[in-house]
Image (cartoon, rainbow, N blue to C red):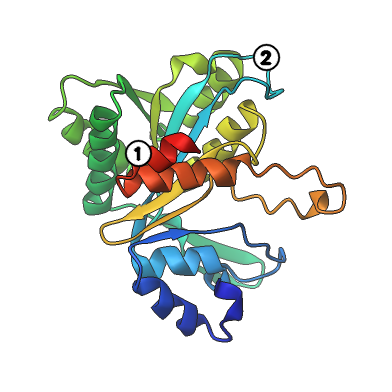
Amino acid sequence: MLSGFKKERDYIEELRKYRTVLKGTVAYEMDQIMTKRTDLRISKELDLYAYAVHAFSMPGVESARHPDIDIVTIRECSEGEYRNIEHEVTPGVVRSVKLITQEKSERIARYAFEYAVAANRKKITCVHKANIMKLADGEFIKAAKSVAEEFPQIEYEEMIVDATCMNLTLKPEQFDVMLLPNLYGSIIGSVVAGLVGGPGIAPGCNIGEDHAIFEQGARHSAEDLVVSKKANPTAFLLSSVMMLRHLQLPYFSNTI
């Protein structure tokens, strides 16, 4: 339990001792600085670069009108807009930098394709806005294309983020695995969770080379549901299932 630590470094160092962690949601005030957010600090300190959300239709769950959804979003979460590179140029004028590198883009693309092969998935959709951000998002899809050539058994396509949102509302069953830069992945991850019933349904994980944290896929603290007792623990339970599979404990994961 991280709540017992008084200093940020204390819980970061404690987390370093473990390769696998099951984490609950954390609430923040809207005016808190990004670099002080616990989840972002953990991701940066432990180099957790891949954030996956698994949204799938479940019997008995009242959700949207689409009954056959099974989507995995894989989000690059070590750079992009979340690097918090911004400053005030002059009063009333702010500059924010979106950082995209070939190295990190290829790393997340390779993770997505290797995941698709291991999970017997058939298609990867790379989501971008390269029609406007030609250099930044262009670098991301360039890396994805390069890695895709190594996996001819996986169908590869690209889709502009605007069209992706429209198609998710119209025909989400067309998507299998989605590969996304940081900001789009944060948004689309919440969209797919909403399609299958809400933030309390879809599990997720944050993966690095040496550590893995399993948690609710859509990071919604649901504080407004505490009194009403309507909060749904399904996503947390399914995240534990993902964790047990990651630890190669299939009997326990299947039992849950």
Of the 4 image quadrants, the one containing the N terminus is: bottom right
Q: 10 Å neighbourhood of mark 1: few (<14), some, or many (≥20)?
A: some
| 179 or 225, nearer to the observer | 225
Which image quarter: residue 118?
A: top left
**Residue 27 versus residue 174 in the image, above or below:** below
Neighbour tally class for label 2: few under 14, some 14-19, many 20 plus, Cα within 10 Å: few
In the rendered structure, the answer to whether residue 101 lies left or right of residue 11 reads left
Compared with 204, 97 (above or below) is below
Residue 250 image label? 1
Task: Indicate the position of residue 224 as horizontal and vertical percent values.
Answer: 81, 51
Answer with left or right where residue 71 lies relative to residue 218: left
Looking at numbered disc 1 in the image, what kind of residue is underneath it? Pro
Q: Quadrant of residue 109?
A: top left
The residue most toward the left is 150
The answer to whether the residue labelled 2 contacts the one labelled 1, judged by CB atoms less than 8 Å apart, is no
Q: Secondary structure at mark 2?
A: loop
* Residue with the mark numbered 2: 65
Q: Is residue 162 above or below residue 79?
A: above
Residue located 50% across and 60% down the image: 96
Q: Nearer the viewer, residue 235 or 148?
A: 235
- The type of residue carrying mark 2 is Arg
Separation of marks 2 and 1 at Cα, in angstroms: 32 Å
Q: Nearer the viewer, mark 2 or mark 1?
A: 1
* Residue 69 in view, yes or no: yes
Q: Position of residue 5 (x, y in %)?
A: 56, 82
Left or right: residue 36 versus residue 60 is left
Residue 38, numbered circle = none
How many numbered tags mark residues here? 2
Residue 180 can be seen in this image: no
